[in-house]
Amino acid sequence: MTDEPFVLGWEEWASFSGLALPAIKAKVDTGAKTSALHAVAIEPFGPDDKPQVRFVMHPIPDQPDLEVVCAAPAVDRREVTSSNGETELRWVIEANVTIGERTWPIEVTLTNRENMAYRMLLGRTAILDDMVVSPTQSCAQKELSYDLYQHLPRSKPVHRPLRIAILTREPKNYSSQRLKEAAEAQGHVAEMINTARCTMAINALSPAIYYDGRRLPRYDAVIPRIGASMTNYGMAVLRQFAMTGAYILNTPESIGASRDKLYAHQVLASAGIGMPTTAFAHSPKDTKNLIEHVGGAPLVVKLLESTQGRGVILAETGKAAESVIDAFRGLDANFIVQDFVKEASGVDIRCFVIGGKVVAAMKREAQPGEFRSNLHRGGQASRVRISKDERAAAVKAARALGLSVAGVDLLRSDEGPKVLEVNSSPGIEGIEKSSGKDVAEIIIDHIESHVRALRRPPVRRRKGKSAPTASAD
Ligand SMILES: Nc1ncnc2c1ncn2[C@@H]1O[C@H](COP(=O)(O)OP(=O)(O)OP(=O)(O)O)[C@@H](O)[C@H]1O
Ligand SMILES: [Mg+2]
Ligand SMILES: [Mg+2]
């Protein structure tokens, strides 16, 4: 027995025999509280009173095809703020770590560290009282080697069918049906799940979703098609699906952000995206100011709860604007006032964005004498070729709100594209019929590559398939 402290360098080789991980290069970080391990495709399993998590680990940073499937007891789920300031809800496991001659139990959070130089971070709570960190030494303890993984077979891409849930209250509508068809055409299984019939058992370590009393299986991916009337409950159901390890096409946060029109306007404005000048106020005294904020009449007044163009009114004169605003105030309705983009001449452009690319676009043209181009107001949809700026604005708007799939509506103004709104459950019928693009298939392709990328980056696309980069016309 010696009194020499156990020295850790600023980086060390670690191993976890219980996780079948014989060698991992770890960065020692006393600035981080908890330790973290790279993990993808994380899914809980096992009985409720003894929950476990299973995950895939790529221990060698430059060999993503080498994967180890690990399982460990889940001891917690915790909000962790990473060094870039982002907060993430992470699974926490307990495992014995070995560094040099010592083996001791530590808590480790699981997170995707794909883009980090080290697959593991050893935080300060894992460093015991008799250990010291020497910031000038690299590997004060025994060095290991990635050769220890040599016996492991390299995985080949397996095109296993995915189990996909389409979360909708309208299983029969065009969009739901087309998504199911497209999934099945590619060999997957797609099930319609009615959001309203899902019940949840809220248990941090063993998330479960019940459907008409029966526990739902684990899905690889969930496609949310949540109507405005179900936004809150739908988001809760989605969060629950996310906890089971499913890939969620549009995250609940991004759906919430795009549904909250005031918030969405603020997000788009701060991302520097062109929009019609927009104003909002609550006090009845502000009518005049409100009108001045958007540069006076003509202007557009929009009820926030409106859809399909119903609550969108054009006030051509200052007097008309005042009476419309006063009328809405009298009804205690939430509304915005917006500069009227006259030169758009009743035409708006819908850009369908999937995975950061505009995959299809259509133009909607109002009928004569009408400025609203909504199809429900008699508008006509047709094929359109969009400009580079329009494409960039649409992609930027979807990204600002964090949506993988989005319908971005914009107007063509003298100052370039102006985004009107971003839809998180855009309909597929109009866009497929007018653009001739197989949008449902591109959505399924996106899901496929994403679910596979979670397990095995980089992804190779199948030959002979139209890539989602296909240009919109
Ligand atoms: N500021 C504006 N300038 C010119 N035209 C506008 C303006 N705002 C809206 N419009 C026209 O009115 C139509 C409806 O407006 P908007 O999309 O904002 O409301 P909505 O369709 O009722 O809402 P939602 O799309 O959420 O159902 C647009 O498609 C566009 O043609
Ligand atoms: Mg609209
Ligand atoms: Mg809309």
Image (cartoon, helix red, strand yellow):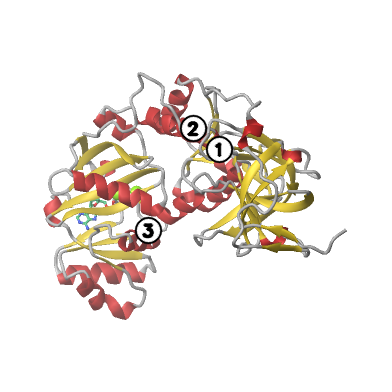
Q: Nearer the viewer, residue 155 or 405?
A: 155
In the depicted view, which residue is nearer to us: 18 or 198?
Answer: 18
State the quadrant of the C terminus. top left
Q: Where on the picture, by quarter, is residue 333?
A: bottom left
Q: Distance between the Cα atoms at labels 2 and 1? A: 8 Å
Q: Quadrant of the N terminus?
A: bottom right
Task: Decide if residue 444 is on the left or right side of residue 398.
Answer: right
N-term mark: 3 or 1:
1
* Pointer 3 residue: 264
Q: Secondary structure at mark 2?
A: loop
Residue kind at label 2, given as amino acid type: Pro
Answer whether labels 2 and 1 touch (C-beta < 8 Å): yes
State yes or no: Cβ of the residue under disc 3 lies below 8 Å from any atom of ligand 1: no
User: x, y (%) of residue 280?
Assistant: 32, 69
Pick the front one: 459 or 449: 459
Q: Nearer the viewer, residue 77 or 30?
A: 30
Mark 2 to mark 3 CA distance (whole Å): 28 Å
- Label 2 vs label 3, nearer the camera: 3
For the residues labelled 3 and 1, the Cα–Cα distance comes to: 27 Å
Residue identified by numbered label 1: 194
Q: In the rendered structure, which amino acid carries the disc numbered 3?
A: Ala
Residue 250: x, y in percent?
46, 44
Q: Could you tell me residue 415's position as x and y percent?
A: 14, 57
